[in-house]
């Protein structure tokens, strides 16, 4: 397999710089997701690794060997594209075998490798069919088999599940992760779907506007977001972000004053995950504005002394009614503060004491 290193890599189209200097390492056998909104530079990064784009500056290395000038076909990289890009006039067997045309593999070797790849993704019985005879999920498996048949050191996945329906996406997430773990292949997944990134990847590279804004485990990005962008992008429903004013050891949020662990001054943002709001007990007053049952959870929109809040509670049925007044508390351990520049204040949180009087 391979260890990937990017050192100050950039990409520009004319005067437009679409990828700011990027430096990162992906370990041998690691499953990493690049997550971000459309246009953030995640697919550009993948195409640079695949050799489909040339870096404007910086160095790309596989196992310590620079590959900037190595052609795509010689990088031993497997790529699965969003569109699958299958040849409609070829059989599934011929589609899977197509990359081997550029390798010195005899006929018997091609047959063996095609059948091995097909078996890995469970499509052996489909080898003599044409792409038009397959479902979307089956075509996705063919595209994956075509990438695996090269026996690549690196597997690159560009939004591979975006064309599948919701039920099939769930199944394929599990299968892709299982295949990656079984093969131990260094894998990079590009996605805008946070659930895909969180459930499949060992680490996540979160990007915005051509820059890497945070790298970490799914738990790191969820519980310790580096800034307000990550805090709002990771999590569904997203984190509540409340404008506040820090005055020494006191935080003024709406009509509420909350105690801080250390002195701060100036405008800040208080971040609260919806599931960290405990409804039905506590000294903070609120009123239910809207309720959305989500199956196994219930989503509430509240008007509170702190300002508008979203809360999420486990259960099939709402415990409260629209218009009902209630008290609530917040999980101090998971409350986050962000400074005036939107960066997380790393060692500051609310204390475990009750809120101060308004």
Image (cartoon, grey):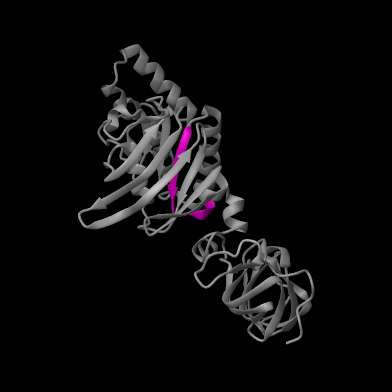
Q: In which quadrant of the rendered view does residue 24 lie?
A: top left
Residue 133 in magenta stretch = no
Q: Is residue 215 above or below residue 245?
A: above
Question: In the image, which residues are magenta?
Answer: 186-195
Residue 71 is situated, as x and y percent measured from the top left of the image, at: 26, 31
Chief SS of the magenta region: strand
Residue 191 in magenta stretch = yes
Q: In which quadrant of the rendered view does residue 351 lie?
A: bottom right
Looking at the image, which is closer to me, 135 or 215? 215
Q: Is residue 135 above or below residue 63?
A: below
Task: Report whether 358 appears left or right of 134.
Answer: right
- Res 74 seen here: yes
Q: Is residue 146 above or below residue 297?
A: above
Residue at image point 52% right, 29% down: 184
Extreme-left residue of the structure: 14
Residue 151 is situated, as x and y percent measured from the top left of the image, at: 41, 24
Residue at image point 27% right, 35% down: 87
Task: Report whether 132 appears left or right of 240.
Answer: left
Q: In which quadrant of the rendered view does residue 308 lie?
A: bottom right
Residue 18 is situated, as x and y percent measured from the top left of the image, at: 31, 55
- Res 291 seen here: no
Looking at the image, which is closer to me, 95 or 173? 173
Looking at the image, which is closer to me, 305 or 14? 14
Q: Is residue 87 above or below residue 264?
A: above
Task: Report whether 35 appears left or right of 345.
Answer: left
Residue at image point 54% right, 47% down: 170
Image quadrant occupied by the C terminus = bottom right
Residue 140 is situated, as x and y percent measured from the top left of the image, at: 41, 40
Number of numbered callouts drawn: 0
């Amino acid at each position: 397999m391979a260890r990937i290193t990017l050192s100050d890599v950039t990409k520009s189209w004319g005067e437009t710089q679409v990828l700011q200097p990027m430096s990162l390492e992906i370990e041998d056998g690691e499953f990493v997701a690049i997550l971000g909104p459309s246009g953030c530079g995640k697919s550009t990064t993948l195409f640079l690794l695949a050799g489909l784009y040339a870096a404007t500056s910086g160095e790309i290395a596989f196992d310590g060997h620079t590959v900037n000038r190595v052609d795509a076909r010689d990088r031993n990289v497997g790529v699965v594209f969003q569109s699958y890009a299958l040849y409609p006039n070829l059989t599934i067997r011929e589609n899977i075998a197509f990359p081997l045309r550029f390798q010195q593999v005899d006929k018997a070797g091609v047959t063996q490798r095609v059948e091995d790849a097909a078996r890995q993704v469970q499509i052996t019985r489909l080898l003599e069919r044409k792409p038009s005879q397959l479902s979307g999920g089956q075509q996705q498996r063919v595209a994956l088999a075509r990438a695996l048949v090269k026996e690549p050191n690196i597997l690159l996945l560009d939004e591979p599940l975006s064309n599948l329906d919701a039920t099939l996406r769930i199944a394929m997430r599990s299968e892709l992760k299982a295949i990656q773990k079984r093969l131990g292949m260094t894998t990079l997944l590009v996605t805008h779907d946070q659930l895909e990134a969180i459930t499949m990847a060992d680490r996540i590279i979160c990007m915005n506007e051509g820059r890497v804004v945070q790298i970490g485990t799914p738990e790191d990005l969820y519980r310790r977001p580096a800034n307000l962008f990550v805090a709002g992008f990771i999590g569904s429903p997203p984190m509540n972000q409340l404008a506040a004013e820090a005055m020494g050891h006191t935080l003024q949020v709406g009509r509420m004053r909350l105690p801080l662990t250390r002195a701060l001054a100036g405008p800040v943002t208080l971040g609260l995950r919806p599931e960290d709001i405990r409804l039905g007990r506590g000294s903070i007053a609120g009123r239910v504005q809207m309720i959305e049952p989500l199956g196994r959870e219930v989503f509430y929109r509240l008007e509170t002394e702190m300002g508008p809040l979203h809360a999420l509670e486990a259960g099939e049925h709402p415990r409260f009614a629209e218009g009902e007044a209630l008290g609530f508390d917040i999980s101090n351990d998971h409350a986050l503060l962000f400074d005036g520049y939107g960066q997380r204040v790393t060692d500051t949180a609310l204390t475990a004491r009750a809120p101060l009087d308004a």
